[in-house]
């Protein structure tokens, strides 16, 4: 029976030869992840179960990244609960402050997620890891508690949609633009409970950072997961980091899909998602005049070194508009150090921006960049719902790092080509 890559991974982890969309299955997991918002709930449920140990202390990752360094007493209590739990149950992968990064950038960087894995995380953007050829999806804190006890999770096998990208990418067009364009095409519910499988010559030519950005935002189309079959680019990224064996899977040529979409990327320009949905996309040439108060470059979507290099290329030798606040958030300590070594931080500071320690903070309106009433931000983050980054009357416009950097200089949403 022909199988997609998603079906093959789930079958292998369920001890089956094959699985079919719609089936309910139990699978063993390779990694369970939680952060400082979701982990305390899972920890409380785990402790109430009165079990004496977690299923495997090396297959659990706890990453406080949303409100750290702790912004108030409540966030301090949440991280304290994680720290206490990690010490009590000898959790190997507990990352805090100097070792802490934004979870979905940190785990691949550390080699903790590999091709062929099943990964669950109490965070919706866990689907990022599909860029490595794994089945990765967000779940609730209750599911994480159960997984920490049993090492298993249950799923309904999702149907898959194949997205094929061909042509030549234009200047300043990145993986962020491809996924925004795709969401604009199918809508925020266009892939509900389906696996988005990204393929084609353009995908093969993308760096891992762009692939992770695309898989990261699969959830913004309602998808259960996003996935890209491993190739040489994947293996070049994985091999120096992997500390255990892994198995790569690919879809059979005659595997069944719920839908197949084909895009000629030659016709795609940098995209901007207007409030209040990621599907509300427009090409940069049709944006019009949209003044901004803030620009944010970072997050689990676009806080990698490749993203910071693009932003620095635009900002180098220029200063931001006097009415704009520019916040740069390197996603991990390793990204921060690399940016410092390459002189990128000096470029950001010279442009009158500020550089934050790794945090999810501004993306969810937590801290380090909360918007006031009526303020507008252009951001490389992944969501622009009502009140996402602050006040309910504020507005968030999603874009790639080049557009965000150019907009900070122009004082309005605009293209690097204008500079």
Image (spheres, rainbow, N blue to C red):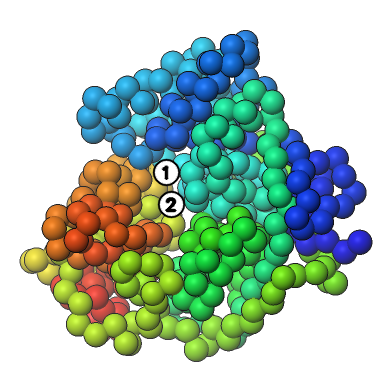
Residue 87 visible here: yes
112 and 273: which one is in front? 273
Quadrant of residue 57 within the rendered picture: top right
Do the numbered discs 1 and 2 sit on residues whose CB atoms are within 8 Å? yes
Q: In the rendered view, would you say 16 is above or below 152?
A: below
| Residue at the image point whose x is 23% and y is 52% from the top | 390
Q: In the rendered view, would you say 394 is above or below 202?
A: above
Element assignment for label 1: loop
Element assignment for label 2: helix
In terms of sequence position, does the residue under pointer 1 or pointer 2 come before the other? 1
196 and 194: which one is in front? 194
Q: Which residue is mark 2?
A: 300
| Residue at the image point whose x is 42% and y is 43% from the top | 102
Between the residue at mark 1 and the residue at mark 2, the CA separation in whole angstroms equals 6 Å
333 and 322: which one is in front? 322
Percent coordinates x, y for residue 110 in the rendering: 55, 40
Percent coordinates x, y for residue 103 in the rendering: 47, 42
């Amino acid at each position: 029976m022909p199988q997609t890559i998603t079906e093959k991974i789930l079958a292998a982890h369920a001890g089956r030869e094959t699985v079919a969309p719609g089936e309910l299955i139990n699978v063993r997991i390779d990694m369970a992840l939680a952060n400082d918002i979701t982990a305390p709930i899972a920890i409380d449920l785990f402790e109430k179960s009165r079990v004496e140990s977690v299923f495997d202390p090396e297959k659990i990752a706890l990453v406080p990244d949303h409100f750290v360094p702790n912004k108030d007493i409540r966030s301090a209590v949440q991280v304290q609960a994680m720290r206490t739990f990690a010490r009590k149950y000898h959790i190997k992968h507990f990352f805090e402050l100097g070792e802490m990064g934004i979870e979905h950038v940190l785990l691949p960087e550390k080699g903790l997620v590999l091709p062929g894995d099943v990964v669950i995380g109490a965070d919706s953007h866990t689907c990022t890891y599909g860029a490595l050829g794994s089945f990765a999806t967000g779940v609730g804190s209750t599911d994480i508690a159960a997984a920490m006890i049993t090492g298993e999770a249950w799923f309904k096998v999702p149907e898959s949609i194949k997205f094929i990208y061909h042509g030549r990418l234009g200047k300043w067009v990145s993986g962020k633009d491809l996924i925004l364009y795709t969401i604009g095409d199918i809508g925020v519910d266009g892939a509900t409970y389906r696996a988005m499988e990204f393929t084609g010559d353009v995908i093969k030519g993308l760096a891992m950072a762009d692939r992770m950005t695309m898989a990261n935002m699969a959830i913004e189309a309602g998808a259960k997961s996003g996935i890209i079959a491993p190739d040489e680019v994947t293996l070049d990224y994985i091999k120096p980091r992997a500390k255990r064996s892994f198995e790569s899977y690919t879809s059979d040529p005659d595997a069944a899909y719920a839908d197949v979409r084909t895009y000629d990327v030659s016709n795609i320009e940098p995209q901007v998602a207007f409030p209040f949905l990621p599907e509300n996309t427009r090409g940069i040439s049709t944006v019009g005049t949209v003044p901004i108060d803030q620009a944010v470059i970072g997050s689990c979507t676009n806080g990698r070194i490749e993203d910071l290099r693009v932003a620095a290329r635009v900002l180098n030798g220029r200063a931001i508009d006097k009415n704009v606040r520019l916040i740069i958030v390197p996603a991990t300590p390793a990204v921060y150090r690399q940016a410092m070594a390459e002189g990128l931080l000096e470029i950001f500071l010279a442009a009158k921006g500020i550089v934050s320690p790794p945090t999810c903070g501004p993306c969810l309106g937590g801290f380090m960049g909360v918007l006031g009433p009526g303020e507008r931000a252009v951001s490389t983050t992944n969501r622009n719902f009502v009140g996402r980054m602050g006040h309910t009357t504020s507005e968030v416009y999603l874009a790639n790092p080049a557009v965000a950097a150019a907009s900070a200089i122009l004082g309005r949403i605009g293209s690097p080509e204008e500079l």
